[in-house]
Amino acid sequence: MSGTKARRRTAVAGLRQRGYDGPISSRNWQEAPSHITAGMGSDVVLDLGWGRLVFGHTFNDQTAVVAALRAEGSGRRDIAMYVRDPQVLVGLAPHELFVDPSYTFRLSLQRYRPPRDRNHEVFVRMVRERSELDEVNRIYASCGMVTADPDVMWDNHRTRTFTYLVAEDTRTRRIVGTVTGVDHVLAFADPDQGTSLWCLAADPQSAPRGTGEALIRVLVERYIARGRALLDLSVLHDNEGAIALYRRLGFRPAPPVVVKRKNPINQPLFSPKPEEMVELNAYARIIADEALRRGVRVEVTDAPSGEMRLTFGGRSLLTRESLSELTSAVAMSRCDDKRVTRRLLERTGVRVPRGIDLGSDPSADTAGLAAAEELIRETGPVVVKPARGEQGKGITVGVADGAELRRAVAEAAAHCPDVLVEELVAGQDLRIVVIDHEVVAAAVRRPAAVIGTGSDDVRTLVQKQSRRRMAATHGESSIPLDATTEAVVRAAGYAMEDVLPRGERLEVRRTANLHTGGTIDDVTDELHPDLRAAAVAASRAIGIPVTGLDFLVPDVSGPDHVVIEANERPGLANHQPRPTAERFLDLLFPETRAMS
């Protein structure tokens, strides 16, 4: 028997002899014997930057727990754990507190079994530099979690009470996951020798499979090395994927419940939603959640299309995701036809790429095709696209000669009889969201890409990345295994059956459309003032209250740009944590602005 196990068993036996028959954190409905809690800290509250942990079983007075929760900071989410008699606690302030709809799961560290094979795609380690906490917050935001104060996290990190772990993708060295641990022995001399796990998160865009499990295992093994006995965590009751993972690792349900304040962040947890909301996609649901938080009534009128009726103070508006009745039919038609968009922007002075408008029978428009071939000779490869359409359908990028041009025109015409040929402008694909003629968010969109493992062929890598994108976007994004993907891979010098070298990045689509597996990086704070001004000018030229404008730019921090199209229904959920839904509700119901 190891020395650590022997000491642990001796300590537990000693507690049994003194009349203690189980973890006090499990027996939250009764007072623990005083000889067990002697020396344990009292009224313990720990600040994690995103909120505070209130350890209810360290308080002798329930009203003091209520007072601690009332001290919650704005924009923060405090959590009261191990509260004794939670029904009494909530009864003391029923309009302020609620029992969280979550489960507590517990792992007995004595029963932990290490994995047969380690995950070689991620390397889990401690946070090393303060700047890495910005990456932690980036992952929190991408998972819809409350971000934390980096100064608080960094101060915590320099103590042994807190453990901040990050997972690196071994192929790219990018941080793709994080987890936080709290040592209850160091926090308040816990007689249970307990610990807890918080804020497990993996980057939905790029984390390799098994990142969450790798983070949990490293945290568990660190606490085993310290001689701790238990690891607890709290998980929402409907997070089926996480619950399945915890059960597989040996976690089991435990009695403690969680109590929280009825604040705007927690509103979806304590206020009932219309049953139909569960059928909404992410782009409609972000708007519905914000509406409910403000007291706006939500009636789902057609879930598959994301259509809802929002009502406040006797005034109702129909919305379809970010498209509302405030967008006129004329403005919508201007966005729908890319040729009209180009003309309106050019007249306003907004820069657009050179282009050729082929007729309604583009294959027979010999003059137009000749002009398009001349454009290729003057500017190099071009883009061929349907004049109407969305989600990147029918677009061919990099058309370099007459034969390719005719094939691309036929492909575009299959989606819309009117076809547009534009010069291919090099640069980053930038989406700027403008609401009520103000820039709210900006992001660079990147084409779908895979990273080599050294063992998987390109086809397998695409399939794996596509599954990750589908999970991260609730089925809205995936990488098609079609002729376009195969052509892009072939142009890069690979076949779909080739094994991609470890760490090598391969783009598998030409366009950065999110529906075909593209990813998105927020650049709102880096945006050059000229780009902001061009976006606002474009929204005013079209006369549209909500739009997503697609730019091509060499650098988001510089002034150079062209605008290639405008979208009348931009996906607001793609830009979290930017306040896109908040500004949308401000536009629809300005009287609720104070609630944002």
Image: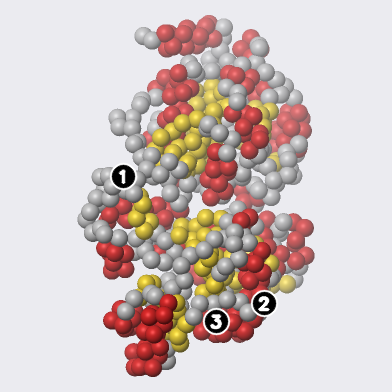
Check contact, mark 1 vs mark 2: CB within 8 A.
no
Q: Earlier in the sequence, mark 3 or mark 1?
A: 3
Residue 556 vertical position relative to residue 393 in the rendered view, above or below: above
Kindly state the secondary structure of the residue where label 1 is placed. Answer: loop
**In the rendered structure, which amino acid carries the disc numbered 3?**
Arg
Label 2 vs label 3, nearer the camera? 3
> For the residue carrying disc 3, how many other residues have a C-alpha within 10 Å: few (<14), some (14-19), or many (20+)?
many
Q: Nearer the viewer, residue 152 or 85?
A: 152
Could you tell whether 540 is left or right of 424 in the image? right
- Relative height, residue 166 to residue 381 (above, below): above
**Quadrant housing the C terminus:** bottom right
Q: CA distance from mark 2 to mark 3?
A: 14 Å
Is 7 on the left-hand or right-hand side of 450?
Answer: right
Task: Answer whether residue 3 is visible to the viewer in this image.
Answer: yes
Using the image, determine if residue 406 lies above or below residue 537: below
Compared with 533, 179 (above or below) is: above
Residue sitting at x 50%, y 57%: 520
- The residue indicated by pointer 2 is 540
Residue 274: x and y, percent? Answer: 59, 60
Seen at 38% across and 74% down, the residue is: 381
Give coordinates of residue 370: x percent, y percent.
37, 89
Q: Which residue is mark 1?
A: 502
Q: Does residue 506 appear left or right of residue 455 in this picture?
A: right
Picture disc at residue 342 = 3
Residue 480 placement: quadrant: bottom left
Residue depicted at 65% across the width and 57% down the height: 579
* Residue type pointed to by label 2: Arg
